Image: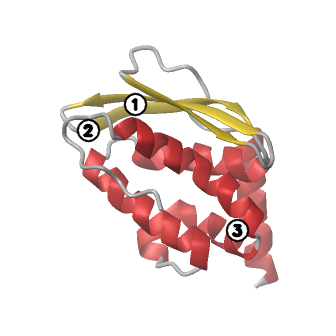
Amino acid sequence: MDKLRELYQSMILDHSQHPHNYKVLAGANLTADGHNPLCGDQITIYIKVENDLIKEISFQGQGCAISKASTSIMTTILKGKTVNEAQAIFIKFQHMIKSGEYDIEEMGKLAVLAGVHKYPVRVKCAILPWHTAVNSLKSTDQSEVFSTE
């Protein structure tokens, strides 16, 4: 189990130090800002949605390793998903990050963040980008109002 934890920590650090999709997205039709005052995380999510499909997604900002890794992984997973698929992934991620319970087949790369549930202050760091993206997606005509509770 220690080897698995080391692998997960290594993946979190890698995503934090070399985040995927870290850029201002030209042509984004949705943007949202997120801030976690507890640790100072600040992010802006850029999304290009066409016909209910997330064509592109990126971010910029500053944050702790958990926040940046969560955002980096989120952008790779949500690209190519529909707004409803993004909602479903958010709900599963939220459950995992708060409880530590997950199905590896459903969560894929996001499973590296499951251990965050042991550190309640860090849960807010991991979920910040998701709340930010969901709030942005709420403005699309195709989506229903998402519960972020």
- Amino acid, disc 2: Leu
In-front residue for pair 3/89: 89
Residue in the picture at 70% in, 68% down: 116
Q: Helix, strand or loop at disc 3?
A: helix
When the figure is inspected, residue 103 is found, relative to residue 132, above or below; the finding is: below
Could you say whether the residue bearing mark 2 is in a helix, strand or loop?
strand
> Image quadrant for the N terminus?
bottom right
- 149 sits to left or right of 99: left
Q: Is residue 82 visible?
A: no
Residue 148 position, x and y percent, is: 45, 56
Residue sitting at 75 percent across and 40 percent down? Answer: 63
Picture coordinates of residue 73 (x, y %)?
56, 49
User: Which secondary structure, mark 1?
Assistant: strand
The residue carrying mark 2 is 53
Which corner quadrant of the image does residue 2 belong to?
Answer: bottom right
Q: In terms of image quadrants, where is residue 91?
A: bottom left
Closer to us: mark 3 or mark 1?
Answer: 3
User: Type of residue at label 3?
Assistant: Val
**Mark 1 belongs to which amino acid?**
Glu
Side of 145 relative to 97 (left or right): left
Q: Counting other residues with Cα less than 10 Å from the Cα at mark 2, is it few (<14), some (14-19), or many (20 or more)?
A: some
Between disc 3 and disc 1, whose residue precedes?
1
Q: Which residue reaches farthest top?
A: 26
- How many angstroms separate mark 1 from mark 2 (CA)? 9 Å
Residue ID for mark 1? 56
In-front residue for pair 64/106: 64
Crowding at label 1, few (<14), some or many (≥20) Cα neighbours within 10 Å? many
Q: Is residue 132 left or right of residue 81?
A: right
Which numbered circle lies on residue 116? 3
- Compute the Cα span from label 3 to label 1: 27 Å
Q: Is residue 125 above or below residue 91?
A: above
The residue under the point 54% across, 72% down is: 96
